[in-house]
Amino acid sequence: MVYETALFQLAKGTTENEALQHLESLNPLVSQLPGFISRHISHNGQGQWLDFLEWESMEQAKAASDKLMQMPEAAEAFGVIDMGTLQMFHFHAVSSTQ
C-alpha cells in the first residue's frame, strides 16, 4: 500500500466551503483510477489543508497523480489550491494498526 499526501494552502479569496466543494468534485474521477483505495481531505483550521489518498502500489499512485493533473475537468478543482504552497509526497506503508 502507498500513501499519497498533498499539503497546501488555499488560493487567495477561496473560502473553506468553496475549496471543499471543488476538491470533492474530484472524487468521481479519482475513485475510478487504477489502484485507488481511499481519499481523505482535512484541514487544521489555520490555513493548512491535507489531501490524503491510499493506493495499491507506488506505480499506480504516481500514474494516477500524473493523469489527474492532465485532466481538463480537474483544472477548476485545482484552482482552489495555492500551487506555490503545494507539497506532494508518496510513501510506502510499512506498519499500521487499528
Image: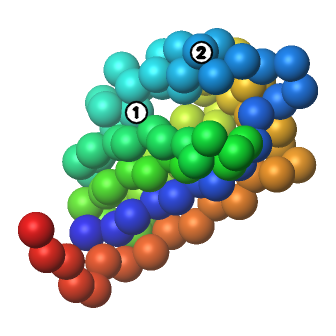
Q: Quadrant of residue 73?
A: top right
Which quadrant of the rendered structure holds the C terminus? Answer: bottom left
Q: Callout 2: few (<14), some (14-19), or many (20+) C-alpha neighbours within 10 Å?
A: few
Looking at the image, can residue 96 be seen? yes
User: Which mark is drawn over residue 1?
Assistant: none
Label 2's element?
helix
Identify the residue at image location x=78%, y=19%: 14
> Which residue is identified by label 1?
30
Q: Dot 1: within a 10 Å radius of its alpha carbon, few (fewer than 14), some, or many (20 or more) residues?
A: many
Q: Is residue 41 positioned above or below 2 on the image?
A: above
Q: Quadrant of residue 80?
A: top right
Mark 1 lies on a secondary structure that is helix
Amino acid carrying mark 2 in the image: Asn
| Count of numbered badges drawn on the protein | 2
Residue situated in front as seen by the camera: 82 or 66: 82
**Foreground disc of the pair 1, 2:** 2
User: Looking at the picture, which amino acid does disc 1 mark?
Assistant: Val
Image: 61 above or below 26 = below
Which residue: 25% across, 61% down? Answer: 56
* Residue 1 falls left or right of residue 42: left
Q: Which residue is mark 2?
A: 17
| Colour pattern | rainbow
Q: Which one is nearer the viewer's eye here, 14 or 75?
A: 14
Q: Who's the residue at 30% across and 77% down the image?
A: 93
Horizontally, residue 44 falls left or right of residue 58, namely right
Seen in the image, is 90 located left or right of residue 2?
right
State the image coordinates of residue 10 (x, y, percent, origin top left).
76, 34
Q: Quarter of the image containing the N terminus?
A: bottom left
Badge 1 or badge 2: first in the primary sequence: 2
